Amino acid sequence: MSGFIGRVGNSCVKEKLLSALNLLQFKDDDSTGVLFCNKEGQHLYRVVGKVDELVTLIPEEVDGYMGIAHTRWSTYMHQVLENVYPLSSENGYVTLVVNGLIDNIQMIKRRLVKRGYSFRSSSAVEVVANLIEDGAVENEDPLRALHRAMQQLEGDYALLAVFNGNCKKIFFAKNGVPLIIGKNHDGMVICTDYTPIADQADEYYYPNDGELGYLTSDNMVLYDGKLKQRKPSFTEVSVSEKTLELGDYPHYMLKEIEEAPGVIRRLINNYFDGTKYRFDDRLIKRIIDAGTIVFIAAGTSYNAALVGQRYLRNFNKKVDVFIASEWIFYPYQSGEDTLYVLISQSGETADILKCLRTIRAYGADVLAITNVEISTLYQSADYRLLLHAGTEVSVASTKAYIAQITLLSLLYARLVNKITTIAALERVIEALYNIISRRDTIKAIADQIYKSGDVFFLGRGFDYDVAVEAQLKLKETSYIHAEAYQGGEMLHGPIALIEENTPVIFFISDSLTVAATREVIREMRDRKANVIVCSLAPFNHDGDSFIISNPIKGYHSPITFAVFAQYLAYYCAVNLGRDVDKPRNLTKAVKDRSV
Ligand code: F6R
C-alpha cells in the first residue's frame, strides 16, 4: 500500500517524520523516500527498501524544519530507484508525494512530451510534477500552479508539494483520498493516516475533496476548489486517542489486547451518565422508526456486526449484515426507511467508503460506528458513534472489536431501557482482568497447537460469531489455516478434515446449545482430535481447557471469548516468529492501490 507524511515545525522534523513513516510503513512496502528542507536547500534520500535502510542513508547532520516522506508498495514487478517518491519536476520547480489513482495520466504525459518534457521515471507522480511546473507562470504564487494542475487531474488523489526556494511551506491538495492535518505548539503535520500522527497533534482538520492550501509552522491556509479562501475549523482530539507508547510491552497487539477492560470502562463513561444512557435521541428515534437495519462492514468489524445483528433482532428489528466488498456489487435495498450502519475501526476502508457513496446516492441515512473521529466515514455520516478504543496500532484488530461489541450492547440496552447491562458490563471487566491474569494458561494452549496446519473453531449462536473472529485472528497473525463452523455444521462435511491431533476449539456459553455442542465434542474426541473447550462456568465440564468463572451474561460472552482468542493468536504468532504487529500482506486500513 502507500502513504505519506509531511511536517513543518518550530524544531527539527527528522525524528518525528521518520518515526511516523515507520508507523505508516506497510509490511510489504518496498520503497521509501524523504525530502528535508533547510537553509542550505533541499536534501532528498530515497531507497528501494524499508525505512530502516532509508535512515542509514541520511547523514546525522542533515535535518530541517520542514520535510515530506513517502512509503509504498509498488505496482511494478521490480521497484527501481527512479520511481521512488518524492519525485521532482524536470527543472526542479516542485517535488511531490502523491497517493491515489489518476485516471488521465497517460493523456497528460503525451501532452507534456509534445511540449518537450522528457521523463526519468515511469511514475505518474513525475507526470503530475511536470504538469504543475508546466502550468506555472513566472513569479506567480505556487498555489495557483497547483490549482491549475488540479483542474486537469481526473481521479482520486491526495498530494504534498514542496516548491523550490520555499522551505517554509508545504502545499497540499485533496480529492477523494484521505488526508489529515494536525497541529500543536510544535508545528503542523499532514498525513494520509491518523495513527502515525496521533501523538504529534492536539487538533485536527480533515480537508474536503477539492480543497487545497499550504501549511506553515503555525498555520494552515485553506482554499476551496474555486480558490476562495476558507476558514478551517480544527477538532480537538481526546488524550485517550493518543496513547502510542509501547511501554514495557513487546508488541502493540499484546498491549492492545490488555487494554480491553479500560476500553469498556471508557465506553460506559461515555454512553452512561450514572443513571441513564447518553445516546443522541435523534439516533434512537431513527432506529425505532427504521423498517430495516443494514449492517455493512469488513473483516473484524463485520464479525462484530454479526453480534450486533443478534442484539438488534431482539429489539424486533429486521436486521441484515453484509460484507462491504460484496454489498458494493450487490447493493440490496430493503426499503426507504432503512438505516445503514457502517462499522469500521479506521473509518477509511475503501470498500466501506464506496458503500457510503452508494448509500448517499440512495439518499438514505448512515450511522457510522468508528474508532477514528478524523475519518471520512465519521465526518460524512448522518449519525455517529465513537468507539473510544484509543489508537489501534497493531494491524490485527483486538480492542476495537471489544469496543464494537460493547457499544452495540450499550445501544441495544438503551433501546430496551435495560440499565442492568451496566452492571453486567462491570462483571465483564472483572472477567477480563481475570483472563489477563491467566494469560499463561492460554499461552500453554498456544504452545500445544502452534505447529498445526489447520485449526477449527466451533460454536453456536454468539459462540459461532466469536468463532469467526477467532479464526480470522489466528489466520492473519500466525498464518495458520483456520476455519469457523456453526457447531452442528461440522458434521456436514468439514468433519472429513479432522485427523488425529487436529485442534478443534469450542466456545460454549448458552444453556440452549450446550448439550448439542457437547455431542459434537464427543464426535471430535472419537476421531482423536485435539479438543479445546472454552466455556462459561455454568456450562463447563471437567477437562474444559479454559473456563470463564466470573458470572457474565451469555450475550457478553463474545467479549471474553474474543480476548481468549486474541491471546491464542498472539502466542501462536510469537511462537512462530511472525511479525506480530505487521502481518504479511496486510495493512491497517485496506485502501485502494496508489499511483
Ligand atoms: C482484522 C483486521 C481487518 C479489519 C478490516 C476492516 O484484524 O484488522 O480484518 O478488521 O480490514 O477494517 P476497518 O474496521 O478499519 O474498516
Image (spheres, helix red, strand yellow):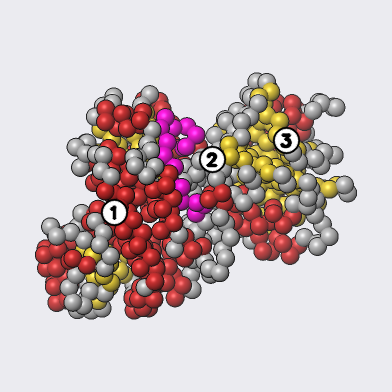
Q: Which comes sooner in the sequence, label 2 or label 1?
A: 2
Q: For the image shown, how many numbered marks are present on the structure? A: 3
Q: Nearer the viewer, mark 1 or mark 3?
A: 1
What residue sits right under mark 3 in the picture?
Answer: 219
- Specify few, some or many for label 1: CA neighbours under 10 Å numbering under 14, 14-19, or 20 or more: some
Residue 321 position, x and y percent, is 29, 42
Q: Nearer the viewer, mark 2 or mark 1?
A: 1
Label annotation for residue 374? 2
Q: CA distance from mark 2 to mark 1?
A: 31 Å
Which element type, helix, strand or loop, lies under badge 2?
Answer: loop
Disc 2 vs disc 3: Cβ atoms closer than 8 Å? no
Question: What amino acid type is highlighted by mark number 1?
Answer: Ala
Q: Which comes sooner in the sequence, label 2 or label 3?
A: 3
Residue 401 position, x and y percent, is 38, 53
What residue sits right under mark 1 in the picture?
Answer: 424
Which residue is painted at 69% across and 53% down in the image? 17
> Position of 223 compared to 195: left or right?
right
Residue range corresponding to the magenta coloring: 377-392
Which residue is painted at 20% across and 42% down in the image? 314
Which residue is painted at 67% across and 42% down in the image? 183
Q: CA distance from mark 1 to mark 3?
A: 47 Å
Which element type, helix, strand or loop, lies under badge 3?
Answer: strand
Residue 394 position, x and y percent, is 50, 59
Task: Decide which of 406, 584 is in the foreground and name it.
Answer: 406
Disc 2 vs disc 1: Cβ atoms closer than 8 Å? no
